[in-house]
Amino acid sequence: MIAIGSDHAGFEMKEALKKHLKEKGYEVKDFGTDSDQSCDYPEFAKAVSHCVADGVAEKGVLICGTGIGMSMAANKVKGIRAAVVGDAFSAQATREHNDANIICMGARVIDLEKATEFLNIFLSTDFSFGENHIRRIGKLED
């Protein structure tokens, strides 16, 4: 299962990515928002993050205007490693090196084609389990 959420700025992108995920066979839990009406991103970040941290969802997707606010809010939840992604290399590296479990993207920064590409890379890349990466993630958790 993939948990997904957005604020008003990311609503259209969230809806498109949700459809894409379902077409690829993923079960998707949508935590909102349900329109492009102004709302506060922290509530959606919190809901998605707890779903991932509690093990209900394998990974999460958060979208706002830049991805920054969502990542800041998500990373407040213990066990979450949320990363803002704006390029293909970062989408891959944050999974391989950081074992990121939530991808954050900015609908005002990247277009839907790039967001779809980055999401596909994020979901298809495994953590490398290198000793140095495990050590560093342990330090993040501490």
Image (tube, rainbow, N blue to C red):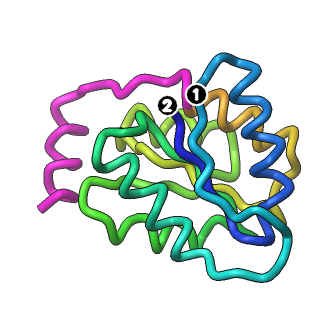
Check disc 2 and report its element: helix, strand or loop.
loop
Task: Report which residue position mark 2 lands on.
Answer: 1
Q: Nearer the viewer, residue 97 or 115?
A: 115
Query: Which residue of the protein is positioned furthest toward the top in this rendering?
Result: 25
Q: Earlier in the sequence, mark 1 or mark 2?
A: 2
Q: Image point 28% across, 47% down: which residue?
A: 54
Mark 2 and mark 1 in contact (Cβ < 8 Å)?
yes
Q: Which residues are magenta?
A: 123-142
Q: Quadrant of residue 12?
A: bottom right
Residue 19 coordinates in the image, percent (x, y): 79, 34
Q: Nearer the viewer, residue 54 or 137?
A: 54
* Distance in Å between CA atoms under marks 1 and 2: 5 Å
Quadrant in which the C terminus appears = bottom left
Drawn side of residue 132 relative to residue 14, left or right: left
Q: Quadrant of residue 100?
A: top left
Q: Main secondary structure of the magenta part?
A: helix
Amino acid type of disc 2?
Answer: Met
Task: Report which residue position mark 1 lands on.
Answer: 27
Residue 8 coordinates in the image, percent (x, y): 78, 71
Check disc 1 and report its element: helix, strand or loop.
loop
